[in-house]
Image (cartoon, rainbow, N blue to C red):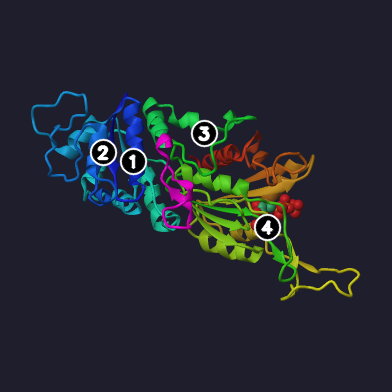
Amino acid sequence: MARLLLGVTGGIAAYKSILFVRLATKAGHQVRVVQTETSQRFVAPETFRAITGAPVLTDEFEPDPMRGAFPGDPQPTHAAISHLALVENADAYVIAPATANAIAGLATGRADSLVASAYLAADCPVLVAPAMNHRMWHHPATLRNVARLREDGAIVVDPGSGALASKGEHGDGRVAEPEELLAAVEAVLSGTAPSAAVPTGPLELGPGGASPSEGSLAPGTPQDLAGLHVLVSAGGTREPIDAVRFVGNRSSGRMGYAVAARAAARGARVTVVAANVGLPDPAGCTVVPVATAEELRAACAEAFGSTDVLVMAAAVADFRPVDPEAGKIKKQGRTGMTIELEATVDVLLELSARRRPGQTLVGFAAEHGDQAVAHAREKLTRKGLDAVVVNDVSQPGIAFDATDNAVTIVTAGGDRAVARAAKERIADAILDDVLVSRGG
Ligand code: CTP
């Protein structure tokens, strides 16, 4: 059983922290609570005091009647400095809910509340559970701040997706459920968090392994991509024939979204250029929606300058109708129809031509049959890439619109087959190879 210090900041999700404290105390943990002033507009300190059996502190200068002790522990005879004594005695410091404002403060090291100064003074594991509106969660400022917290060693327990506090709004930003949060804390304390959640080594990949939910952040995930900007293209482009019809393909965006979610979970700043993807946004990523190859080209070109790693998972149309109709083509009077197509720009090739040292470029190839790897190797050289991820689209049950995939990663150093597994695991294998090719 552990001593848990809970920091509560000012959002509507503060009520869930009451449930967290109940669960934690029922499980036998000793809990103390520190609150920001704003959080007391949502939950009164008396509520936490009643459940924990200990006073709640808000102000750094407020004397702690328990002198930094946790319930059930002997109290020291000298008066303690609250923000130092409480975290010194805690086995873990959990900040939940953490508002966008609180996260910004923590990321910059501001010590403007007891919650914040306890964070700076903590040398125990710190878990941060963000809670906010989805637009705030996806704002580049928040993404930067969250990435900074991870770099600084905090374990960010990603918010979930669903109905948000503002009426009618859905999306990412709901604070992790109390049960999940407690499980995350206990996993960190027992040292089982990293490997139990998502194996990151490619050699551990195998069929039938458990898949983390898309975009979930396993507590303790190694932050080996911290400081990198990863640009991922995902989905499939649609090239208009007329106002209602298009030339498209079967790509769902699952593979690209899995790469984006895993890169974010591993600490990267992630931009996703998403072509017609009907999935929830991957957590912690900036998503730029596009429709056509030309729009995808423009969005990628804009983000590429600051990109360290490009993973081009989108199925970009190779051809598009030369002269799309502005209205809807009527069938009346026609017995057939020919649509003239023209080649689109190869976006990956174009970006590769302007790459600068230090950028890593990964392409995908949908290949059919025996010559898959040989074709991919040719693509690797022709497009000047660091890796090509080959999907053998002749295999049933993988690749297009499936949750699993099996790939071969072709690099200058050789080929590596990654056995069938959830796309998140394949994503981790690709990102591992990216790190290897960057020499890390
Ligand atoms: N790609 C691109 N722009 C295009 C077409 C493809 O950026 N207009 C990218 C894809 O995102 C992918 C890689 O290039 O990363 C695929 O290369 P490509 O040569 O198109 O391979 P295949 O789609 O497998 O097609 P082919 O059968 O022509 O080899």
Tell us which disc is closer to us: 4 or 1: 1
Residue beneath the point at 86% across and 74% down: 332
Which numbered mark, 4 or 3, is in the foreground of this view? 3
Q: Which dot, 2 or 3, sits closer to the camera?
A: 2
Q: Which mark is residue 198?
A: 3
Cβ at disc 4 under 8 Å from ligand 1: yes
- Mark-to-mark CA distance, 4 and 3: 30 Å
Tell me residue 169's x, y (percent). Answer: 47, 57
As measured in the structure, the alpha-carbon distance from the residue carrying label 2 to the one carrying label 1 is 9 Å
Residue wearing tag 2: 48
Q: Quadrant of ligand 1?
A: bottom right
Q: Nearer the viewer, residue 358 or 91?
A: 91
Name the residue carrying label 1.
17
* Amino acid of disc 3: Val
Residue 151: tell me if it is visible: no
- Amino acid under disc 4: Val
Residue plotted at (66% across, 63% down)? 293
From the viewer's side, name the closer residue of 353 and 107: 107
Marks 4 and 2 sit apart, C-alpha to C-alpha, by: 54 Å
Direction right: furthest residue:
335
Circles 2 and 1: CB atoms closer than 8 Å: yes
Residue 228 relative to residue 202: left or right:
left
Which element is circle 3 on? loop
Q: Measuring from the top left, give residue 242's x and y in whole percent.
A: 74, 71
Tag 4 residue: 316
| Residue bounds of the magenta highlight | 158-180
Q: Which residue is at 14% across, 32% downward?
A: 67
